[in-house]
Amino acid sequence: MKRAGYFILYLCLAIVAIFQVFPVIWLFLFSLKNNQEIFSKSPFSLPTEFRWENYSKVWEGGIGIYFWNSIWITGVAILLTVILASMATFAITRMQWKLSKLVLGLFMVGLMIPIHSAIIPLFSMFLNVNLIDNPWSIVITYTAYNLPITMMILLGFYYTLPREIEEAAIMDGCSVHRMFFKIILPMTIPIMSTTVIINMIYNWNEFVFVNTFISSDQYKTLTVGIQNFIGQYMTDWGAIGATLIISVLPILLAFLFFSNKVVEGISSSAVKG
């Protein structure tokens, strides 16, 4: 009975995995076809000829600018979010000061505010400081909105860290800043990997803020720039498929290489102590 139960479980998981992976495989095959193959044959058929030139065509057409903007904006925003959230969580959970609970509550209020309800106030603020059509307005917005969820994930891990480590470091003459960067921060790498993946998914796929604050093509990210780009190849569906594959590839690679870290981070946060 136990073996039968495992067999049914794995069978169900395999079916779910097939349904999850199939759209990506279909889109990849779609991107290697021309219009004739797409419309005259079954959508599930293999391409008669793998047309890799679809990828070179869209890359030479300018999608590289949007791709690079998405990479550096996402990367900088993740770095700022994780570092600032770690500092704030360390101060709230490991230090004793009167307003720590109040400050934590103020950060958590951010989870209750609909993300896009602040577009007009943010637009007005960035307009006053000349940050409209500036990529740093996107970096600042991503960092601010991702701080609450990042801190919430880190809180459970920080609360369970043994205080004996900090006491030993202080007895050895370690300052607070050095203790945070040299001792505490390296210990939180597993849970930080989880926050990095979550932040990356949101930052990479976000559309509304970029579409509102950025108007120049040189600063647009993939999610917004891809609209204009698809318009250039409206009659070339293979090129459109190649564009979409390029846009989802980084997220797929991130999951492929860091999925174990995410599970490790969640597990360590749940059972530590």
Image: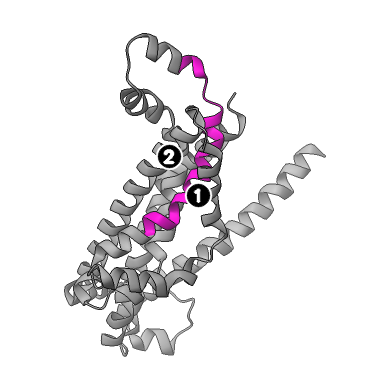
Stretch of the chain drawn in magenta? 142-165
- Which image quarter holds the C terminus? top right
Q: Are marks 2 and 1 in contact (CB under 8 Å)?
A: yes
The residue lying furthest to the right in this view is: 1
- Please indicate whether residue 131 sits to the left or right of residue 238 in the image: left
Residue 267 vs 130, above or below: the answer is above
Using the image, tell me which numbered label, if any, was put on residue 107.
1
Q: Quadrant of residue 18?
A: bottom right
Q: Quadrant of residue 267?
A: top right
Residue at position x 73%, y 49% in the image: 8
Residue type at mark 2 is: Ala
Residue 162 vs 219, above or below: the answer is above
Residue at position x 45%, y 14% in the image: 167
The residue lying furthest to the front in this view is: 98
What SS does tag 2 mark? helix
**Viewer-side residue, 132 vs 48:** 132
